[in-house]
Amino acid sequence: MKYAMVLVNIKGLGVKTFSYLIPDEMKDIIQIGQAVLVPFGRQGLINAFVVGFSDYIPGDFRVKKINRILDKTPLFSLKYLKLLEWVANYYCTDFVTVLNTALPMRLIEKNAKVELAVSLIKEDGEGLTKRQKEILSLLKERGKSSLIEFEEIAKTTRTTMKKLADTGFVKIEEEYIYRNPLSIFKDVPVEPLYKLQGEQVDAYEGIKSKFKSQNPILLHGVTASGKTEVYFKLIQDVLDEGKNVLFLAPEIALASQLTKRLARKFGIKDVAIWHSSIGEGEKYDVWQRLYKNEIRILAGARSAVFAPLQNIGLIIIDEEHEGAYKQTNPAPRYDARVVARRLAQFYQAPLILGSATPDVSTYYYASNNNNLFEMKHRFNNSPLAKPQVINMQEHGKAAYRNIISKPLQTEITETLERGQQVILLMNRRGYSTYTQCKACGTVIECPDCSIPMIWHASIKQLKCHYCNKEMTFPDYCPQCGSDALSTSGVGTQKIEVLIKELYPNARVERIDSDILTKKNAHIELLSKFQRGEIDILVGTQMIAKGLDNPNVTLVGVLSADSGFSVPDYRASERGFQLLTQVAGRAGRGEFKGKVLFQTYNPEYYAFQSAKSQNYEKFFETEIKSREEYDYPPFSQIVRLIISSENNFRAEKSSMEIAMKFNSMTEKFGFSEYVEVLGPTPCVIEKINGFYRFQILIKNKLSQKGHDFISKFLNKITMPKDIRLAIDVDPLDIL
């Protein structure tokens, strides 16, 4: 073909393509999906992607040539491109925004710099900066002038390599050498698959019978019921058919644990891992191996749903209820579960969702479609640990620092004496949750966000958990000038300190996002816990799922009712899920487990359901409430957040949008089925200096309603001082 049709990497152009002449030297190697450099107006050379070919163009135009191919290996197929286009349409966002999220763009941009440098070097340095010319001169003195020779020099001296990398001549050394991210599991021996038993066999056979279903299949199994072994048997069946498997976990720590188990069962060669913390070079190499169909099983967190795994025969999403599958910021605000459903339809592959506490909507649809399979007993029929409720209205005064009750202290002591391990959950980071003036009652808030600053004793700073602003502890109250400032509330740091005071001989560690700054820190910490090198593990919700440590016999939840008080329609569901999941960490081995919930509100229905480990009881109550107020699964929610540094401007703009949308729904007769709530100030009214208002749209017309809403939103143009964020299927409404 004479011309290539390309998508240019510029926002606002959607899927509009531009035609470029294919130079003769590229005609035999150019392919759909390749990244190329093309000239584009005043922007000079920019990244673009080949999406088609033609022998002619309409009209009499002077067509520019493709400058160069950045990588001979294509980055995607046309089927993959259609998936990204669907994501852009569904989440009401720009196509290039989705493209930049899905593809390893940073490495492609580095390649562009390298290729540009090469073209300049071939012209004997014309157009180079002074510093680049000095380095080029130095290299030429050594008789080096080609990119390949640059690479050789980069390998010989770290200093030269660093200078070259800084100037954009070459990539950093680690990104040239393929390092399998599974290298940390290199000593793991391959084990045979476990033989399924009892309910596992029934679940496996039932799921296999639904493989041709177009609807997701739900495996609802209590904690430690052996769901993973069912997954592995299904994976083996799919591999035997010559097809590949995508396996998602909600968080990086769980994805790493899952990958280790997959490597143990299926070998390292056919398994790869994908998440945001692996290096760009590693990610790029895995991407190319995926496209070449050299990987059979891909495990990862939510971003793995965009990896170009070929010939998909099965998609599994474990712990499907987890909010971590949803990207809340920045756009595209996609949900990996929703994208995976579309991906499964593209490949006509079954999608299996697994959880001990499924999302209410997932359970509703699966039961109505007859795609629900349940495992109600633990493997080997070991009993579920029944939670014991500690009413802090009675035990609070006698508790250590009014936080750790006497019954919990006794259980911890007895557990440690038996040589067993303890998990303590406090779902708040930091040392204390707010700082208040005892004289006037003022709470120290973030100057840019309308939330309290959190005291972090380890860094001796007040910190905002929304914008990360830090400040020193004030000497005086900013409102009244009093020095009667004190910290209140409890976070994981404080619990760690108190536990060390109570049990000075115990090995105590804390796991939350504040300490997981080093790459693979979560793997190392959880491995230590697994090896028995930690006696008591204190953490946030990240310890509530995925941990399978048979020596953990006690789980304590220090503020069990804190999640239920959030003003959000999902608050009860999230609170129930968290308590049920963390309770499932106890007694997974041969020893009987105990679970203690500390609470000031023991009679709340979601709390009672969590106490009895009864999902069906919780679901029956919750689904009635959802139906009464038309919340999912009885509607789709689209949330609009309008924000500005000027409070009046934000409120005015949100009112205008709501009025226009209401007029449209009335005009087309949709008012009964597309409901608009708001605008109202967001629960957290200000973040990062921007005042926020929200509009909630309840869509009860399925796809027809979604198309109607999307058409309206795509026509909105906002002033420069106003931000509009569109969140389809929001995780929360805070």
Image: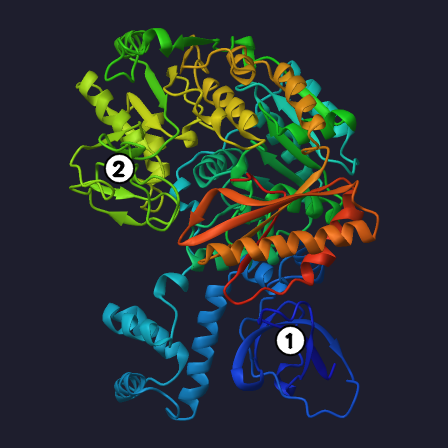
Residue 683 in the figure: left or right of residue 149: right
User: Quick one: which residue is furthest to the right in this view?
Assistant: 669
The residue at 31%/41% (across/down) is 453
Q: Is residue 334 above or below residue 718?
A: above
Provide the residue designation for mark 1: 30
> Residue 347's x, y, as percent?
73, 48
Which residue matches tag 2? 455
Whether residue 301 is visible to the viewer of this picture, yes or no, is no
Callout count: 2
The amino acid marked with disc number 2 is: Trp
Could you tell which of marks 1 and 2 lies nearer the N-terminus?
1
Report the side of 695 relative to 156 (left or right): right
Q: Quadrant of residue 481?
A: top left
Q: Specify whether 606 is left or right of 497.
A: right
Q: Secondary structure at mark 2?
A: strand
Classify 10 Å Cα crowding around label 1: few (below 14), some (14-19), many (20 and above): many
